[in-house]
Image (cartoon, rainbow, N blue to C red):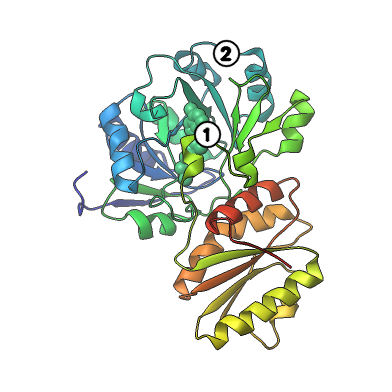
Amino acid sequence: MVAGKRTKYLKIDPRVPELHKIRLAARILNRGGVVAFPTETVYGLGANALDARAVRRIFRAKGRPSDNPLIVHIASFRDVQDLVAYLPPRATLLMQRFWPGPLTLVLPRSEVIPDVVTAGLDTVGIRMPAHPVAQALIRAARLPIAAPSANISGRPSPTTGLHVLKDLRGKIDAVVDGGPATVGVESTVLDLTAPVPTILRPGGVTYEELASVLGEVAIDPAALGEQAEQPRAPGMKYKHYAPRGEVFVVTGEIERVTAKIRALVADWQRLGYRVAVLATQETAPAYEQEPRPDHLEILGSRSRPATIAANLFAALRNCDRHQADIILAEAIAEEGLGLAIMNRLRKSAANRIIHA
Ligand code: AMP
Ligand code: MG
């Protein structure tokens, strides 16, 4: 669409999506438009994956570098066949176990997929989202839908329809608002074309779950914050998930972390900066006394990382609303969903890690 054109806003019931709204959004996709829609992970910005012109509109709206590939979303198992050159046996196993759900499989691509979708790679990332609105929309459009997260490139991913509007109003054809995304971090991207299945991006399906099905699973060094010489997925090299304030992640034993963050709050405030803290239920009381941060976000409970994942991106955006210059985030344990959470935090911090 032409920049500055009106973006349709369609509020929809996530449990029983109203059919006329789904059809309206599907028609826009069929005509080559771009539509943001809810998935269980984050909001996606979708276009017809088989139409190179439509897909280029996604890149333009987001300001996304053209060498960063998109994930193709489908709504039925049958749809995979046409999109891939062949299906390795373990792909079928994983699809049965984790689809629909937050797992993207990187597979050898077929020629129906335009280069712009895969950034010229000979592989394609495919996933079947679990969200009823995403499923209804893909079915109604009768198309595979290419969709990255529906944010301006580099910003925190959107977990509500309003986050999408904030970033992309006037740049896309429509937003389907089906309420907050429940998982809150993106899908796990698993490369099945490597000799050992390799996690390129940790996400909603955990390493532990994948290992229980596959036995051996590798994690790409870049996903762990180590500098890979040659990133496997181009998206891994970009600045990501970043609010306007500078994020620092503080690691170490928990009492030392809270003490260190309190000292840093005092230091930065003395220099005249506005400081936000990303804390957990267990640690929040430490920041409810002097020196008080200018803004405190309580992400969730350390014993339930899913609560932290669900709130993470909204919390980063809230820090912007509160005009935080500095955002101090507590590290959490890198197990289960914690691996994905720490991956996003480290990237939003551009690897500024402080050891307490
Ligand atoms: P986004 O949804 O904005 O987070 O972007 C999708 C991400 O999926 C990209 O940044 C890549 O890391 C990954 N991805 C998509 N397709 C491929 C592929 N063919 N090979 C490797 N990674 C991929
Ligand atoms: Mg993204």
Foreground disc of the pair 1, 2: 1
For residue 323, say whether it is visible.
yes
Label 1, secondary structure: give it.
Answer: loop
Quadrant in which the N terminus is drawn? top left
Of pointers 1 and 2, the one earlier in the residue sequence:
2
For the view shown, which residue lies furthest in the top direction?
86
The picture places residue 3, in percent across and down from the top left corner, at: 21, 50
Choose top left, top right, bottom left or bottom right for residue 261: bottom right
* Crowding near the residue tagged with mark 1, few <14, some 14–19, many ≥20 C-alpha atoms within 10 Å: few
Front residue (pair 354, 262): 354
Residue under label 2, please give it.
Answer: 87
Residue drawn at the location 56% of the way across and 70% of the way down: 327
In the image, 287 versus 40, the foreground residue is 287
Q: Residue at x 55, y 65 (%)?
A: 247
CB of mark 2 near ligand 1 (< 8 Å): no
Mark 1 vs mark 2, CA separation in Å:
26 Å
Residue holding disc 1: 230
Q: Position of residue 245 (x, y in %)?
A: 48, 68
